[in-house]
Image (cartoon, grey):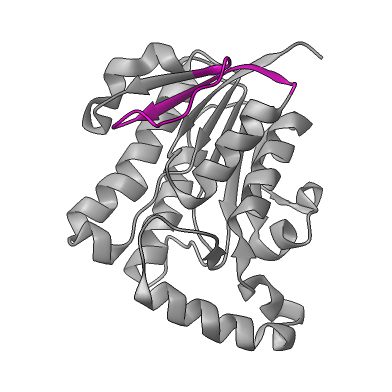
Amino acid sequence: MSQKSAVLLGATGLVGRELLSLLLQSNVYSQVTILVRNKLLIQHEKLRQVEINFDELHKYEDEFNVDDVFCCLGTTMKKAKTKANFLKVDYEYPLAAAKLAEKKRARNFLTITAIGADLRSPIFYNKVKGQTEEDICNLYIRSTHFFRPSLLLGQRSEFRLGEKIGEYVLKSISLCLIGKWRKFKPIKAENVAKAMLEAALEERSGVHVHESDVIYYGNCQGAVTN
């Protein structure tokens, strides 16, 4: 297999950090570019760090001349403070990245949305995630993958009380989450990162949706295909 190149957005996030480590360790990738607001304190012979303004992502289209585009961008309403800011990070940026992947003919575009992503949802968060999936689906990319994890487990850079409470509750009832409910089990960020890398290496064309339970049990070949 010839070596591949990749660009990663969201390298400072919970999943993004895990994915960056995996990409740098992988023998498949000869170059990994991360687009960041501020450079990370990490050095590696395969790593390129490009400081950008995400509001002007279109100016960096040449960075998308790669095989695989990984998008791990995301925020919370509490951190975003307004719906407009949330839309910018969770909808506008991923869609802009996908459009650049389309323009530069990347082979794979892989992004994280969320469990419950649904354009028709009355819940703003889920509706935005659903809209993101819908609009990216309309692009002409050889292979598109959406990952819909449940509550993510891992060491965050900031403390989130609401997520800590949710994590405690879901962990407490995790054994009861079976059948159609098992996709609500909390999932480790590293498992999502592994699933994203695995999907990129499979080279399957089309649109693929990876629900949290499929990711949890490590079988992304069982993803729903649209």
Give the total number of marks visible in the rendering. Answer: 0
Depth order, front residue of 170/94: 170
Give the x, y percent position of residue 175: 74, 85
Q: Looking at the image, is 15 positioned above or below residue 78?
A: above
Hey, which quadrant is residue 124 in on the image?
bottom left
The vertical placement of 110 against 30, above or below, is below
Residue drawn at the location 39% of the way across and 27% of the way down:
35
Picture coordinates of residue 85 (x, y %)? 21, 52
Residue occupying image coordinates x 35% and y 28%: 39
Front in this rendered view, residue 222 or 56: 56
Q: Which quadrant would the N terminus be assigned to in this image?
A: top right
Q: Which residues are magenta?
A: 27-47
- Residue 197: where, in percent of width, then height? 68, 37
Q: Is residue 46 magenta?
A: yes
Which of the pair 69/168 is nearer the observer? 168
Residue 71 lies in magenta, yes or no? Answer: no
What residue lies at 54% left-to-right and 86% top-to-bottom? Answer: 169
Q: Position of residue 123 (x, y in %)?
A: 36, 72
- Residue at x 80%, y 47% (from the top left corner): 221
Q: Is residue 2 above or below residue 165?
A: above
Determine whether, in the image, residue 134 is placed left or right of residue 83: right
